[in-house]
Amino acid sequence: MNLKDLFQTTDPSRRRYGVAFFVGIIGGIMSAFVKWGAEVPLPPRTFTGGRNEFNPPYLFLRDYLGIDPTSTVYTFSEHIINPVMITHIIFSLVFAIGYCVVAEVFPKVKLWQGAMAGLLATLFVHGISFPLLHLTPPLSELPAHEYISEILGHVFWFWAIELIRRDLRNRITKQPDAEVPLNAPFR
């Protein structure tokens, strides 16, 4: 596969942007729970070694939007919940909708059932954007377990988005993805 193949586009008449947007909403909400679930056995941050680090959504709300995330907590099932985690759902919605819409035009974004998109999200968000915004330390200062947690979490996250995207898109349109010929066997 050469670089030109990565930017191959689909037939515009086969694209279903409205379906992609709708499926992105469903995939974004459901995959946010997958990402959270991945962080239970593989926590992404440490609070030892002199680092008193808050999670990036907390810092984003506090430092860039001026919202104190500790001021609005709620209780569910006798647990105190900090709604800063709602930012994860918002980020998940944005990424899932974007992914689903881009997949209608550039099918190679779905490489490895979405795992490549998860790796790219890790690189661009956690590797470049967060350090530039001072939401996390530079990559050179992070321990290996944080890389492992974020990489695996993002791969599972985008894999879940892709599984949901493909299933719902194909069920709604009753057609295969836009790059698959209509006369191809379809299950």
Image: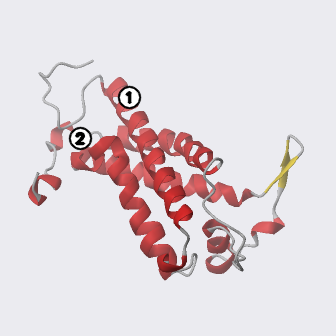
Is residue 22 in view from this perspective? no
| 128 shown above or below 83 | below
Q: Residue type at mark 1: give it.
A: Asp
Spot the residue most to the right: 78
Q: Position of residue 108 (x, y in %)?
A: 22, 48
- Left-right relation of 77 to 46: right
| Mark 1 vs mark 2, CA separation in Å | 16 Å
| Picture residue at 40% right of the left edge, 68% below the top | 124
- In which image quadrant can residue 143 be found? bottom right
Q: Residue type at mark 2: give it.
A: Arg
**21 vs 106, nearest the viewer:** 106
* Mark 1 burial class by Cα count in 10 Å: few <14, some 14-19, many 20+: few
Q: Position of residue 133 (x, y in %)?
A: 52, 80
Pointer 1 residue: 167
First in sequence: mark 1 vs mark 2: 2
| Picture residue at 54% right of the left edge, 79% below the top | 141
Is residue 14 in view from this perspective? yes
| Picture residue at 52% right of the left edge, 43% below the top | 31
- Left-right relation of 134 to 1: right
| Secondary element at image label 1 | helix
- In which image quadrant can residue 173 be found? top left
| Secondary element at image label 2 | loop
Q: How is the image coloured?
A: secondary structure
- Kindly indicate whether the residue at mark 2 contacts the one at mark 1 (C-beta within 8 angstroms): no
Pointer 2 residue: 15
Q: Position of residue 119 (x, y in %)?
A: 38, 57
* Mark 2 burial class by Cα count in 10 Å: few <14, some 14-19, many 20+: some
**161 vs 54, nearest the viewer:** 54
- Left-right relation of 121 to 48: left
